[in-house]
Image (cartoon, coloured by chain):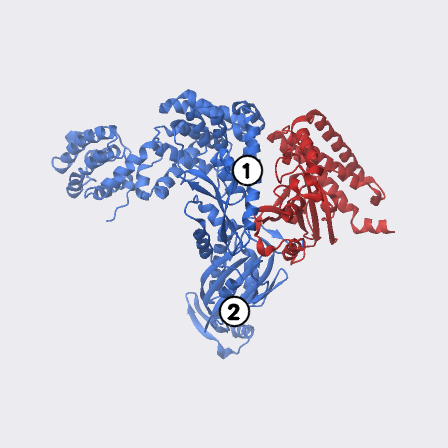
Chain colours: A blue, B red
Amino acid sequence: MSERFLLEIGVEEVPDWMIEPALEHMRQLFTEVLADNNLGGTVDSVDATPRRLVLRASGIAEAQADETKAISGPPVSSGPGAVQGFAKKMGVSLDALQKAQTPKGEYWSYSKKVEGRKSIEVLAEALPVLIPKISFPKTMYWTGKGGVRFIRPIRWIVALLGNEVIPFELAGVKSGRTTSGHRLLGKPEVEVTIDTFADQLHTNGVVLSAKQRRAMIESGLGPNVHPDEALLQTLVYLTEYPSTIHGSFDRKYLELPREILSTVMRHHQRYFSVNVGGDNLAPEFVAVMNTSADPDGLVRLGNERVLRARFNDARFFWDIDLRRNLADRLEDLKNVTFQAKLGSYFEKTERVVLLAKQIAEAVGASRVMCGRAAQLAKCDLTTEMVKELTELQGIVGGLYAREQGESAEIWRAVYEHYKPVSMEDSIPSTVTGQVVALADKCDTLRGCFEIGLMPTGSRDPFALRRAGQGVVKILVEGGLRLKLSDLVGDNPQLREFLLDRAKYYFRDVRGFKYDEVNAVLTPRTEDLGDVEARLQAIRQVRPTENFEPLAASFKRIANILRQAQFTGAGTIDVSVLEPGPELDLHREFLRTSDVVFSHRKARNYDAALEAIGSLRPKVDLFFDKVLVNAPEERVRQNRLLLLSSLLTEFSAIADFSEIVTTN
Amino acid sequence: MEVGAGTMCPETFLRVTGPKPYKVAYVQPSRRPADGRYGENPNRLYKHQQLQVILKPSPSNILDLYLKSLEAIGIDLGKHDIKFEEDNWESPTLGAWGIGWQVMLDGMEITQFTYFQQCGGVDLDLVPAEITYGLERLVAFLQGKESVYEIEWTPGVSYGDVRLADELQNSVYNFEVADVETLWQLFAIYERECQRLVGMYPKYVPKERFPLLSAYDYVLKCSNTFNLLDARGAISVTERVGVIARVRKLAVGVAQAWLDQNTPEHAEAAAE
């Protein structure tokens, strides 16, 4: 007989963003409990609302299977005293013992029967240990100093195996079969069974499935809502029974920039904003309630009133900030610490201005524009608006710069210089913006690596990975041809870090195969802007008949050279080459080198790779007919040199020995 | 006494420490100079009234009790939307923090709910629940007023009649007129007096007579002066950390002395 299992941890409202990771951890912990105790069974689902974490499983054995354990005693060769002692220790007579052959000789052994325990007992011990182990970013205690820690106080626990309550106590709460409904829509105490659980919750105003809550919200949003996945996810875990209301606000607030209005709605009020005619903001919003309806429209009125007050506040900040020139705030940055060892934001700005001008020169952008934009970039940090809406830093600076008459090229660069903020985000839209964004990020990276603040494991307080990712993305997608060493200076760790980021970008974001990425991105890579063209070429040429076999041959060459510990250089002695496949290969090598060189110079990588591929028949023939390890030293060295030249010459676009071939 | 929140009142800050259960509720006028809006914002005020409730230790049905309290003052929860959104409270100047929520009623924050974890840098023996009701907002909500200034204070007299000049003039003072030099001097004077008292405590007998509550008042004066300087834009981000640390040092000093003053042996000595 196998049983179904239900655990519901009833808590006070858990922060929305912590719920999904906690559920996954709970699933993992419980799966371990099942496995470690040989209880069988599998986890069917984990679900949650702000007030409950729920795990359901099935196929759990009623009891552990009985086990026989072989306990080994003294060697048979030892005296009768020893074997009697062993029997006594086991609590059995001598004839219950067997002899067992082991590699070390013959030993006495006893097969002890261990009776399996009831699953309900095992779980009653395991669950109160498991629950506090579920990890949360920040926990609390509530029963007094030294008490159990959890994300929020635990107020009830439902723990059922089949129809039985799994009895235990945690933080003064006894497990049982009584759950609790929605705070306003349901009964505070509801008795359940495994079968009735979900239905009973539903009757009591709780939609247990996050997927279903999401669908309920989505169906109420309406067609013109500005999509916002993160906000949607938040609301799914902020509600037990979501429903939407549509509200509006006075058009006069539309004088404020949309960025500010929508951030106030999203960040402070968790409202969706509504678009009209493409990208314009409508004077409307959609809020999500944690209840079923707004019969008298009171909730809508309340939300509208609150939003008005919020917009008033934003307008207050906008007006007082604009009383000062953005550029005049540069001085204030002397008092804003960037990082204790790296100085103030004023000092950072000075460095970024310098770097931005250098980069501008290298990529043919305007030094003056890039310098000015870099100078203004951090000036919004002391504005009231950024103090209130931190996530709008940069954007607010750009808006104020525009308002105060800076040119579009400059204000847009300020506005976008934090971009890309994620791998999905786009890079700055103008070259000035790209230059300033690069300079800002590279300065942060250089500085932090210099003082030893590299990211480790999950710790990355300065978001250096994101900065590195941004650098890669801007270089590649902006098509900026810059030498990596000019950007990162001579710090080998930072170089490696950026190449790692580049690998991640090309593989995981752009979907290039990992061996192709390894072939093109080598420790010597300098020009990230050029990597994509090479990868595209490989992707295109790879399916052709010559490519993979040739890659296999290149790998073979690399192995031969490695085994021979060949480090030789010099020129190939043509007179030593044997007529036939060897001489033919050499001739083909010279011809192809010229062709490849000119293609490569024109960045015509497909043609270059195809030309390399055309070498294949000669290479195959060479390996077929010619013995590299010729007995005569001079001949052997010359052959190795031929192979080595071949490898070096044609690895300039990609290191083919990294390509994983199918045969 | 000017305080930024009901939490800073000794009835909360000092009483939540130690092993003795305690329950208290009081109205606390709370001043936050940076929140001043010249009386122009419908629900943000320089000085607002909080109903401060401390239940130490917190009962297990505390959130239900809280919801019932809203119904008791006339909010029909069946017709409104209530959400508990994560909002942990921290007062760096008091070395205090807790875990909790802001309670949203139809999208408006009406309450800050906190389970205290530390005060004066010390783990608390019993975990108190602090419920802070924003009175103006609640009353405006109940009376269906657009702005807190439209609240009917008594028949014919609005809250604006009572408070608007206060908000306007203090906003002007806090943002524009307050003399930075003077405020810094005041800060130093309050700090010195508090340090003097905390320094005297170890040798003073009998302990129960020692004016720790007076010392604590100077912590509050420092804290308020800091807030004024901050609103005036006189404290740079760099300096900020240092000034906060100065106030916290005072707060922690008083809290520790208070715990000592209230240890059983001193308490018994006081009873004799």
Left or right: residue B109 versus residue A643 is: right
Task: Tell me the subunit letter for badge 2.
Answer: A
Is residue A554 visible to the viewer in this orientation of the structure? no
**What is the secondary structure assignment of the residue under circle 1?**
helix
- Res A568 quadrant in image: top left
Amino acid carrying label 2: it is Thr
Q: Residue furthest left?
A: A580
Q: Mark 2 Cα within 10 Å, few/some/many (few <14, many 20+)?
A: some
Rounded to the nearest angstrom, the CA distance separating label 1 from label 2 is 49 Å
Identify which residue is drawn at 47% across, 49% down: A233
Position of residue B43 measured from the top left corner of the image (x, y, whole percent):
62, 40
Q: Residue furthest top?
A: A368
Position of residue B148 measured from the top left corner of the image (x, y, whole percent):
65, 41
Amino acid carrying label 1: it is Phe
Quick one: label 1 or label 2, which is nearer the N terminus? 2
The quadrant the N terminus of chain A occupies is bottom left
The answer to which of B161 and A179 lies nearer the viewer is B161
Task: Tell me the subunit letter for badge 1.
Answer: A
Q: Residue furthest front?
A: B156
Q: Nearer the viewer, mark 1 or mark 2?
A: 1
Is residue A103 visible to the viewer in this orientation of the structure? yes
On screen, residue A497 above or below A194: above
Position of residue A221 measured from the top left corner of the image (x, y, whole percent):
45, 49
Q: Tell me the residue that label 2 is attached to.
A: A193
**What is the secondary structure assignment of the residue under circle 2?**
loop
- Res B229 quadrant in image: top right
Position of residue A264 measured from the top left corner of the image (x, y, whole percent):
52, 40
Q: Tell me the residue that label 1 is attached to.
A: A311
Identify which residue is drawn at 69% across, 25% down: B179
The answer to which of A203 and A251 lies nearer the viewer is A251
